[in-house]
Image (cartoon, grey):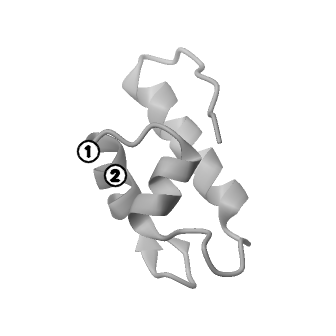
Amino acid sequence: MYLCVCRAVRESEVDYAIDQGCRTFKDISDQTGCSKECGQCAQAVKGYIEQRFESSVGGVTLRLVG
């Protein structure tokens, strides 16, 4: 599924960025280009990142920086 339509960034690309060590929204935005055009996707991308981190640490809530 696309998270950022302007830059055609899919969930799998955000997953890859996280797997490569990106830990903040800014890191992921810089790596993938998401939210660099209109910014409409920022909340969806942040929500996806939070969900991804929660599932990767067994439900422990982490604060997303950036």
> What type is the residue that disc 1 sits on?
Gln
Residue at x-position 44% and y-position 73%: 9
Is 40 placed above or below 60 here?
Answer: below
Image location of residue 1, percent across then percent down: 45, 70
Residue at the extreme bottom of the image, as rendered: 6
The span from disc 2 to disc 1 (Cα, nearest Å) is: 5 Å
Residue at x-position 58% and y-position 22%: 62
Q: Which residue is mark 2?
A: 17
Is any part of residue 22 visible from this angle?
A: yes
Q: Which residue is mark 1?
A: 20
Is 66 placed above or below 61 here?
Answer: below
Image location of residue 14, percent across then percent down: 40, 56
Marks 2,1: beta carbons within 8 A: yes
The circle drawn on residue 62 is none
**Relative to residue 14, is residue 3 drawn left or right?**
right
**Relative to residue 2, is residue 14 drawn left or right?**
left
Instruction: Bin the neighbour count of mark 1 within 10 Å (Cα to Cα): few under 14, some 14-19, many 20 and up.
Output: few
Residue at x-position 41% and y-position 66%: 32
Is 47 placed above or below 1 here?
Answer: above
Q: Quadrant of residue 38?
A: bottom right
Instruction: Bin the neighbour count of mark 2 within 10 Å (Cα to Cα): few under 14, some 14-19, many 20 and up.
Output: some
Residue at x-position 73% and y-position 72%: 40
**Relative to residue 49, is residue 42 drawn left or right?**
right
Quarter in which the C terminus is drawn: top right
Image location of residue 30, percent across then percent down: 47, 61
Is 61 placed above or below 5 here?
Answer: above
> What type is the residue that disc 2 sits on?
Ala
Secondary structure of the residue carrying tag 2 is helix
